[in-house]
Amino acid sequence: MSTQTELAPESAPDSAETARRAKSARRAATALLREHADAMIFAQSTDGLVIPVPESLGMENFKVLATDWRTGSDLCVAEDRMTIVNAWMQLKREGVAEARARMRTDPAQWWVVRMLDLRNTHGVVLTILWPTSEGRQDAEPAPADTPAAVTPRFGTRKQDEEGNVIECDEAYLQMFGYSIEEVVGQPTFERVHAEDQARLIESWIAMIATGRVQMSRVRMRRGDGSWLWVDATYHNFLHDEEHAHVLAECIDVSAEMSAQEALQEREELLRHLLEEMPDGLLQLDSERNVVYHNARLLEILHTQLTCAEATADTPDAADGKAAVATVELHELTQILTDEDLEAFEAVVERALSTGVGEDVEVEALLPFDERRHILVKVRPLARDSGAVVGVIASVQDVTDSARVRRELEQRATFDALTGAHNRSSIIAALAAELETSADTGVVYVDLDRFKSINDTFGHPAGDEVLVQVAERLKAAMRSSDALGRLGGDEFLIVLRGVRGRAVAMEAAKRISHALRGTCELPAGSIELCASVGVAVAERAVGAEELIEQADTAMYRSKQQRLGIPVLAVGDELAIR
């Protein structure tokens, strides 16, 4: 359920990985649908539009919500649409989101809305929703004096050596919903779940052979066909000459087993959700050992380990056990440059020692000199006592966004034609230099007769002249100086570490000399000449003021028509 907020598409994994994730997705969704029998599902595209549920999800047996609206948020009442939009944004960040909302068809009923990001495997966001009792006042409470039927949680039976029931108490009959005739004389083993029979027979044989008390946890069929988890404790009284029997004490543990099964289902669901996340996940303990990683992490880091090798000792997820990672941290980070590996390790160390999370962007060097930018969000894992026991890291490949960011920074900083700093960035560089150093000067350059070049040869020729001028200026500058284009045919050189006017004038003379001579163009040759003004920060002065001084000196140079640099000295100008 969302507005049309587009999610960025992910690269498709190979067919084997797709099959594995498809199975995980079905398990994750099935766990929720099993927990909520009245749940419904629908699917959305990456831009939030409602689309058919993909056949690859294998959800044919579950109820698909009839979709006669365009986007998910259209389903909700107006007051709850923003809640769903926020959940959609959370889904983009975290891969899973949950919210509560009311449908337009029944505004009195609240629904839980769970969104799963399955773009990597199925190209959709799967939404599961089920009703809650919140806000619903239809049900009438039972009268206070109505007696509640309480089913006993403990009962006993007696059996012969063959396992047939000799007698049982009333509590046992109520627990399982049988009459005395249906129990006495019947073998108990036949009412035990097929998956538990071997375990029960093993305990029975051990009890007969050793005479010791044995206990077994099994499911037994009740009179209505349902299954009840019980702990059965067997006491061997077969050597009693008058009343030889086996006493079985049965305790109802169905609530405990239901809680365990629910916990296992939630753990399995969480595990599958972690595998479906578009981000790589890495968990380290306090000794920097890898506790957990998902398959997506291996894809992002382009590790040479396959998923099978990295989880060779991993129990089947169906067993409800946590995965045991066999990969070492150095195997995951070996593609990082030395500098970035040091930065990553420093962030992990600070998270472990101070409990403060940080983000770090590192560069990975892949074969064939391919470089990828990786964003790692490191967060500490702490106990209730506050002790940090490890870290969890979310890993994203941000190469594309980093490239876009660099391009934007390049456009915001440099002149597209000449490669020099643009006006705003060269002034900012000068201002920063004046704040930290008094030994700063500027050289203001203005090309002579540039308009005639544009008028005679055209603007493309004029652009070529500006490019060649910038190249000559860069060649005449020191490596520590900075070149900027103020606009048109005007350039500014920031001189760093200039000690006195003489040094600044020497630099200006080199620059003026570099701009004299012939400039070869496809349309012909032209003679270059430039007017040059120089200013030195001999007192506290701002960037704009210093540039204005150099500009005034440059105009005096232009008036001389000699192409000789002019130095601004206080309120006077000096030609050197």
Image (cartoon, rainbow, N blue to C red):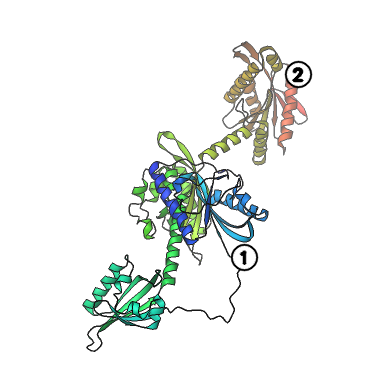
Q: Is residue 245 left or right of residue 296?
A: left
Tag on residue 119?
none
For the C terminus, give its image quadrant: top right
Furthest residue to the front? 181
Q: Tag 1, which secondary structure?
A: loop
* Residue tagged 2: 559
Point out the tag, 1 or 2, that comes first from the N-terminus.
1
Indicate the quadrant where residue 494 lies: top right
187 above or below 92? below
180 above or below 343? below
Mark yes or no: residue 355 visible: yes
Q: Tag 2, which secondary structure?
A: helix
How far across and down, in percent of the image, does residue 414 sit? Answer: 62, 31
Furthest residue to the top? 524
**What crowding class fits label 1: few (fewer than 14 Cα within 10 Å), some (14-19), or many (20 or more)?**
few
Q: Is residue 488 left or right of residue 234?
A: right
Report how far apart the C-alphas of labels 1 and 2 lie in the structure.
88 Å
How far across and down, in percent of the image, does residue 225 sit? Answer: 39, 69
Q: Are marks 1 and 2 in contact (CB under 8 Å)?
A: no
> Which kind of residue does numbered mark 1 sit on?
Arg
Q: Nearer the viewer, residue 501 or 334?
A: 334
Q: Is residue 429 left or right of residue 124?
A: right
Q: Nearer the viewer, residue 337 or 54?
A: 54
* Residue tagged 1: 136
242 above or below 45? below
How far across and down, in percent of the image, does residue 106 sit? Answer: 63, 58
For discs 1 and 2, the disc positioned in front in the rendered view: 1
How far across and down, in percent of the image, does residue 456 sit? Answer: 68, 12
**Point 59% across, 53% down: residue:** 87
> Which kind of residue does numbered mark 2 sit on?
Gln
Q: Nearer the viewer, residue 31 or 7?
A: 31
Furthest residue to the bottom? 242
